[in-house]
Amino acid sequence: MNTIDQSPQSTLHVFEQDGGWQWGITCDRPNGVGVKVLDYSDPGFSSVKEARADGERALAARMAPLLLERGVNGVDALFQNGIRVPK
């Protein structure tokens, strides 16, 4: 996992690249076009299921301090606080 920055509005992406499965966490750029990469996996995983599970753990871990600061706890809090995990 390679953490670059934190953002309250994060999206998890899982994709195949170079024969392995990767995940990335992005957010919309506040003043611009496109998305900003916040975190990504390195190296890849042998299955999409492994990559998704690790990406979801990374997303939850990076959001936990922010959610606790807001007084929120639990997995459902991710979705209630703008965290998007497309399936």
Image (cartoon, helix red, strand yellow):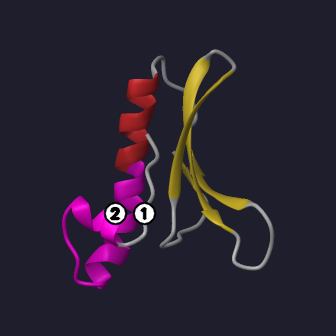
**Residue situated in front as seen by the camera: 15 or 62:** 15
Q: Is residue 16 left or right of residue 83?
A: right
Q: Quadrant of the C terminus?
A: top left
Q: Residues within 10 Å of mark 1 (few under 14, many from 20)?
A: many
Residue at the spot of label 1: 83
Instruction: Tell me whether the residue at label 1 lies in contact with that at label 2, contact meaning CB atoms closer than 8 angstroms.
Output: yes
Residue located 69% across and 61% down the image = 36
Residue at the spot of label 2: 79
Disc 1 marks a residue whose amino acid type is: Ile
Residue positioned most to the right: 32
Residue located 45% across and 19% down the image = 47
Q: Secondary structure at mark 1?
A: loop
Residue 16 vertical placement versus 81 (above, below) = above
Residue 39 drawn at (x, y percent): 57, 53
Q: CA distance from mark 1 to mark 2?
A: 5 Å
Q: Secondary structure at mark 2?
A: helix
Q: Is residue 41 left or right of residue 61?
A: right
Residue 46 drawn at (x, y percent): 48, 17
Q: Which residues are magenta?
A: 58-80
Residue 32 drawn at (x, y percent): 80, 73
Q: Which label was assigned to residue 54?
A: none
